[in-house]
Amino acid sequence: MLPYPPMKATSGTLPVGTDWSYELKWDGMRAIVEITGGVLRLWSSNGKEATVSFPELRALGAAFGHLDVVLDGEIVALDDRGRPDFGRLQQRMHITSPVDAAQRAALVPAALVLFDVLQVGERSTVELPLSDRRALLASLADDLPDGVELASSYTDGETLLVAAQRQGLEGLMAKRVGSRYLPGRRTPDWVKVKLQRRQEMVIGGWADGQGERSGTLGSLLVGYHVPADAPPDERVLRYGGRVGTGFTGAVLADLKARFAALATPACPFTPPPPRDRRGAHWVRPELVAEVAFGNWTDDGVLRHPVYLGLRSDVDPQNVVREPTTDL
């Protein structure tokens, strides 16, 4: 069982001041790390256990010996330049077979970046200010195994943002140094500052391919829940457009196989798409895709979306439209 649902950030512009600290935004999978009696367990944001998918990270359990802890971090896969690559992580996130996971780990190793501590022994640390939690984490994690590191914290957010942009990274996180950890809550005390426009979208259907893609999937029909400030069970799925680029042949085959098990005659969008229903096949809205995009139209549809991958760590009911900031 997920020991603590992760605290979430709001999207916004860069806050500045001495009461803020800054970290790079890692393009990966959020993970709550539970270590009990030297045994590691990994939990995704939506409460699914992910331990089997990342066998190379189990050495972290032994590094803490008999000290029981709960940590917060991000699992990433790095490209040839050492930058987080969500596309590479796709090859690891959805693996449930120990044999397959071990084989993938040898080909596409994962790394874990730790940035918070939520519990030590029987003592919860969530009421401590962030500055104290960071100091505690640093004191605990002085002999980490290969593939595990602590996130670096900076005091100059403007310089860090420029450096992140030059390196082609996703952005940065600004965190108020006196903030408590609020499990499961989205808070303005943590702000994600994006250098790329990205959005989680719920897949509600797909359309037939044309030309070279004839006979297979042409585009995804995606949406997000509204109103964002309503309880999840009171929201409806609003249509957000078609995503027709960013796929490899293997990804298309995988998605079509998944859709076969989710097929439904009922359109999941409210209201149904006014124009994009021709050649549409509906699926139960249980899969979440991450997409990059240019902007939103006035009627809430994505412009120039590009498929980046599936988010098995995100609950579809929690997908809402995030605020768009100037880049």
Image (cartoon, rainbow, N blue to C red):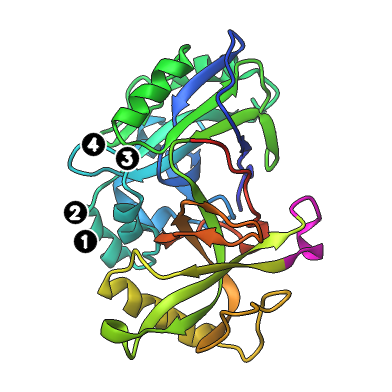
Secondary element at tag 1: helix
Query: Would you name the residue on which mark 1 appears?
Result: 103
Which tag is nearer the camera, tag 4 or tag 3?
4
Q: Is residue 70 above or below residue 41?
A: above
Q: At which x and y percent is residue 177?
A: 60, 16
Q: CA distance from mark 4 to mark 3?
A: 21 Å
Q: Residue furthest top?
A: 18
CB within 8 Å, label 2 to label 1: yes
Which amino acid type is shown beneath numbered disc 2?
A: Ala
Res 163 → quadrant: top left
Query: Would you name the residue on which mark 4 appears?
Result: 82
Q: What's drawn in magenta, residue-wise?
A: 228-236
Label 3 environment density (alpha carbons within 10 Å; few <14, some 14–19, many ≥20) = some
Q: Is residue 121 visible?
A: no
Query: Would you name the residue on which mark 2 appears?
Result: 106
CB within 8 Å, label 4 to label 1: no
Question: N-terminal of the two: label 4 or label 1?
Answer: 4
Q: Is residue 51 left or right of residue 270?
A: left
Q: Is residue 198 above or below residue 281?
A: above
Q: CA distance from mark 2 to mark 1?
A: 5 Å
Taking depth in this image into account, of 58 and 84 the one nearest to the observer is: 84
Which amino acid type is shown beneath numbered disc 4?
A: Gly
Query: Would you name the residue on which mark 3 appears?
Result: 59
| Residue 213 tag number | none
Which amino acid type is shown beneath numbered disc 3?
A: Ala
Q: Does 44 lie within the magenta span?
A: no
Q: At which x and y percent is residue 274?
A: 65, 79
Secondary element at tag 4: loop
Res 8 → quadrant: top right
Q: Does 235 lie within the magenta span?
A: yes
Secondary element at tag 2: helix
Q: Residue at x 44, y 40 (%)?
A: 74
